[in-house]
Structure formats: C-alpha cells, structure tokens
Image: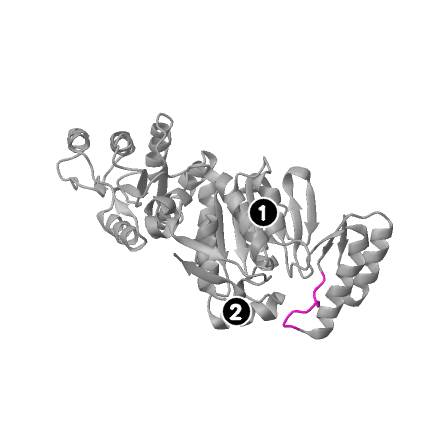
Amino acid sequence: MAIIATPPESVPGLIKELGERGCRAAVVITAGFGEGEQADGKALQQAMLEAARPYLMRIVGPNCLGILAPHKGINASFAHLTPLKGDIAFVTQSGAVATSILDWASARGIGFSYIISLGAMSDVDFGDVLDFLALDPKTHSILLYVEAISDARKFLSAARMASRNKPVVVVKAGRSDEGAKAALSHTGALAGSDAIYDAAFRRAGMLRVKTLDELFQAAGTLATGIRVQGDRLAILTNGGGVGVLAVDELIDVGGHLAELSEATLARLNAVLPKAWSHANPVDILGDASGQRYAEAVNVLLDERGADALFVINCPVAVTDSLEAAQALITTLEKHRLPVLTCWLGEGAPAEARRLFAEKRIPSYGTPEQAVRAFCTSPATVAISEPLWRRQRLFLILLPSTRLARTRLLIV
C-alpha cells in the first residue's frame, strides 16, 4: 500500500509507477481533484483512475485523512493520535470528523477496529467498506458520517447485510439545501434529497442520528457492549428536578416511562424513606447514601416492565457521589438489565465516571444525553418504529449512481 501526499498533478503518474511495481492499493491524501465541480480536478481524478485500472489497484480518497487499523498496528493517515484497539469501526467522508471523534474517544478509553476516511470516494466507497466490515470479526458495530452516496445499489445492498449482523449508526450531513451546497464544495459530493436518504437508511436497517454529539454518544454506548431490547425506561435519582427533565426528554424523543408493578412499589417502600416519590422516576431524596442506592437499584433491576434503568446522582454535601457509584457497580455485578448513568457536575463525579468507564458502564454528562442514547439504541428504534413504516416502505432505484435520482414508492 502506498500513501500519496504530493501535488495533484503528480498523482496519476505516481499511480502508474506504483502499479508497475506491484502495488495493490493507494491512500491519496492530496486534495484538488474536483471539489466544487472544478473541471481540471475532475480530469485529474479520471486520469488517476485510468492509471490504476490496468493493475487492479484500489484507491482510497483523494482528499482524505487516511486509514487507521489499530489491531494491525497500521496508521496510514495524518491523524494526530493513534486510536486504542476496540470493536467499533468508524467510516467517514470527512477527515476533520474522524480526528474529532478520535480525540473524544481516546480521552474516554474507547477503541476502534478501524477508522477509515474516504474523502472524495473516487474508487473505494461506503459500499465497499460495509461489505468488508459486515463480516469482519473484530468489528461489532459501525458508525458512518455520510455526505453523499456514489453508488446507490451497492450501498443499500452492503448496508442491509451489515445491519443484519451489527448495529449501524449513521449521521448524514447536508440535510438542508445550503448544507448540500457546502458538501459539494467540500468533497465534490452531490448530497441529493434528504428525504430519499432518510428512507434509504430506514430501509437498510440503519439508525440515523441528527448531530455529531449524538454520534459521539452512540459510540460511547456501543463501546460498553450493552444492547437495549425495548423503549421502557425506569429512572432512579437523588434529585427530583433532574428526574423530571429526564422524563421530558424521554417523551420528546419517543420513549416510554416504565410502569412499576405493585410488587416493585412494595419492595421499594420497604427499603426507602417514607418521603420517596412512590412512582417512576424513583426519587430516593438528596441524602441518599450508597447503601440506599444499592437497595433501590437491586429492586428496580428486577422490574419486568422496564427495558433499562437510568441512574442519576447530583452532588450534595451530606453524601458521597463516589460511594454511590461504587455501590452501583457492586450491585450491577449480579444483574443483566442494561443500566445507564449520569453523575452530574465536573469535579465531584470525575472519579465515579472513571470507574464507570473501567467497568464499561455507560456514563453521560447530562440526563438529556443519556435519554437520547437510550432512545437511539438500534433495538429501541426498531421496536418503537410504526409497523407500517417497517413493512410497506420500498425503494425503487433507477439505473443511476446518484441517490438524488432515486424514486421513492410507498405501496
């Protein structure tokens, strides 16, 4: 494999020389191959592809960050960090997004199987990479940052196969007309109609998120290995106000508040003070000790009406946030229900968050982030998605390489 970072005019000749020497792949970092529909750049890109064709050489890029494969010790990029080894693959058209998520993940101990920056996708595209990742044993989940799709049929086929085996989460840039124009000037990508992309992602079984923050949170959740099997959430908190905020966000994003059974309420009455909320969210009051957290969590993890438990801690002077975190960790060793946490603040919860990361327990900075992560779990979305949307939506693809020309037919 060759890494090319020379002026664009020199690239076609270098590709030819490399092919003659037996090189089978090239990562072209250089920009200047038709971004913004520049005619001279397009001609250079075509010359590069024609130089590679006789040797069956595959090209990643141009205008890309490169490829990182931590399990193989490969860093064929100009990223500022080498990622930790993990089981998440991140595929992106934007090198800046790649370095951003790499920096965010490294600070949280999150690793990757691959980080692949595709750039202008002159040759290797999302379909090619998804075909590979779908069967890669080191990859357990896939994140995508998409500006445009170059081959609609190949992408949909590969995406459907990948999403049947692994969670695939995608964020699509260029949703607005102005954003689509910005994407064109950035990588030369023709973004096309956002409604068509949305339908294609749904049909392929992928989960679409709207923002980079949601993509980051999805990465953090997937790295813990938890898999939520429904949309009913139980909430435990030592602060009533943040519990209410969590409920508001849950309803806004389409989740449901779990209904606590009479048996669960009776067990909670036996271990909690009389002034507790007697409902979900379970407010165990501001003076809740680690033992009170453990006793309440132990009860809620047996609640069959809940698909996950969200535990919140607000720092107060009369109790220790770290003690509460340690009690939660000890309790969770005996149960399998998915649990998300939010230890609010900056200084006080720092050690608790470190312990959660060490034990692979999902941890978030705000209740809203945690609830969105819960409601954007692939399994949660599949269950809450209306049945008619899952069964009656079909894409009729015309003989075209652009999703912008795709017809959407609902039957």
Residue 321: x %, y % from top left:
33, 39
Task: Answer with left or right where residue 304 lies relative to residue 64.
Answer: left
- Farthest left residue? 274
345 or 373: which is nearer to us? 373
Quadrant position of the C terminus in the picture: bottom left
Q: Mark 1 belongs to which amino acid?
A: Leu
User: Residue 193, position in %: x, y?
Assistant: 48, 66
Q: State the image coordinates of residue 61 (x, y, percent, origin top left).
A: 68, 58
Q: Which secondary structure class fits the magenta region best? A: loop
Count residues near mark 1 (Cα–Cα under 10 Å), then give few for <14, some for 14-19, many for 20+. many
Residue that label 1 marks: 130
Which of the marked residues, 1 or 2, is nearer the chain's N terminus? 1
What residue lies at 45% left-to-right and 61% top-to-bottom? 408
Segment colored magenta: 30-37
Q: In terms of depth relative to the viewer, which is nearer, 153 or 167?
A: 153
Query: What element does badge 2 sit on?
Result: helix
Specify whether residue 289 is painted magenta.
no
Point out the frontmost of discs 1 and 2.
1
Q: Residue 132 occupies which quadrant of the picture? A: top right
**Label for residue 231?**
none
**x and y percentages locating residue 55 in the rendered image:** 81, 51
Q: Is residue 85 above or below residue 128?
A: above
Instruction: Determine if residue 9 is in view.
Output: yes
Q: Which residue is tagged 2?
A: 180
The verdict on residue 34 being magenta is: yes
Q: In this image, 211 relative to 236: left or right?
A: right
Q: CA distance from mark 1 to mark 2?
A: 23 Å
The answer to whether 326 is drawn above or below residue 125 in the figure is: above
Location of residue 133 with respect to 9 vertically, above or below: above
Q: Residue furthest top?
A: 334
